[in-house]
Amino acid sequence: MFKETLLSDSKTAAVKELELKNEHGAVLRVLNYGARITSWCPAGSPENSIILGYQDINGYLEDEHFLGAVVGRTAGRVPNGEMKIENTSYTLNQNEGVNLLHGGTFGFSQVLWDYNYKETSQSLELHLTYLSEDGEMGYPGNLSARVTYALDKHSDAVTFSIRAVSDKDTWCSLANHAYFNLGEGENTHILDHELKAPAASVLELDNSLIPTGQLLSAPDTLFDITQSKPLRDMIGSTEEQIIFANQGVDHFFILDPAQSKKIELMDPGSGRRLKIETTEPGAVIYTSQKLESSLPLHDGEASPYRGICIETQRLPDAFASEGKSCLLKAGDIYSADTVYTLEKLS
């Protein structure tokens, strides 16, 4: 079942919440503004979203934390807003000091997307499209992007798919910036959530959260999550990388290409486990240590460690030797799929 709710109507923007609901009662809600997930409620828990969301539209219009948004053209930070492709340099929008963050001031999270619905035998699908014109935020090329949210008809599973093409060489790395919290009740945190992934290495950061160019071997550091590890074990560390990230994790984890790219998040308190399987080379994992806002959420206050972002995406171009990078050649198809499956442990 599809449903639309008009949240804000003005001369410049008609923001709508678009709802997908399957016959078992699982619900996924998305805004046409920023292609943002506002809630994902599993069957049997119609008001208990496992994704953080604001109580009303004003939260999203004033949001500084990219809640539930699709971020791009490039997710993450571009140091000094400088992009170089072969022998040509481009000056990108600088919206975090001298750096570009998540595509710039008016990146993909800040625009209205066109949309349509499709129903198949397996899923309810919401397709959102956006044309980023040549020169927008400094990026070269007219980039046509489509993201699809597909809610399985028979379970709580959601598939997030991205397709994009540009008429010029450009950088492109789109990610969903949802904050997951598998707990139940108000104002729960993610410190006791446990994380597991076949992480081979991690991008080392400097004190401005910019990759230094060095890789840290994950199994040799506190970032070893090849076995399930409570998030508080990393967040509570006094190691330099955690301090640089404001006493939390905000790092790119490169997944071992020789293994199945499955990430697992589990909350012992609720007995919920989220499995994330992706075609992307890795994910930025962010433990929301800087999440502070006076804007109320569905389940309480916005405060540090309320959620965890697992942003599957492309590698920065400087790390192209480690897997798919953000360089998108003219005419090539950008393709990425990430499947989220929620389970209740016995």
Image (cartoon, rainbow, N blue to C red):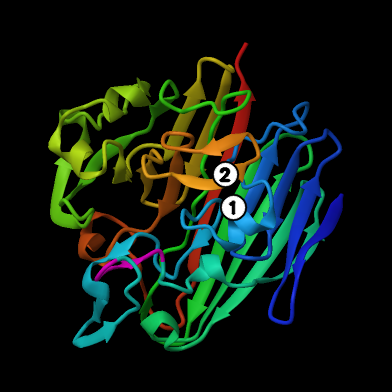
Would residue 190 appear left or right of 204 to someone viewing this image? right
Q: Position of residue 124 (x, y in %)?
A: 78, 51
Q: Which residue is mark 2?
A: 339
The tag on residue 209 is none
Would residue 264 appear left or right of 207 to someone viewing this image? right
The answer to whether residue 54 is above or below residue 140 is above
Classified by dominant secondary structure, the portion drawn in magenta counts as: loop
The image quadrant where one finds the C terminus is top right
As helix, strand or loop, the secondary structure at mark 1 comes to strand
Rendered residue at 39%/38% (across/down): 287
Mark 2 residue type: Val
Q: Which residue is mark 1?
A: 160
Residues at circles 2 and 1 in contact by the CB criterion of under 8 Å: yes
The answer to whether residue 319 is above or below residue 266 is below
Counting every numbered tag in the picture gives: 2
Rendered residue at 32%/40% (across/down): 258
Rendered residue at 57%/80% (across/down): 131
Q: What is the magenta range?
A: 97-102
Mark 1 residue type: Phe
The answer to whether one can see residue 36 in this image is no
Q: Position of residue 329 (x, y in %)?
A: 38, 79
- Residue 230 colored in magenta in the image: no
Dot 1 crowding, Cα within 10 Å, few <14, some 14–19, many 20+: some
Dot 2 crowding, Cα within 10 Å, few <14, some 14–19, many 20+: some
Closer to us: 324 or 95 = 95
As helix, strand or loop, the secondary structure at mark 2 comes to strand
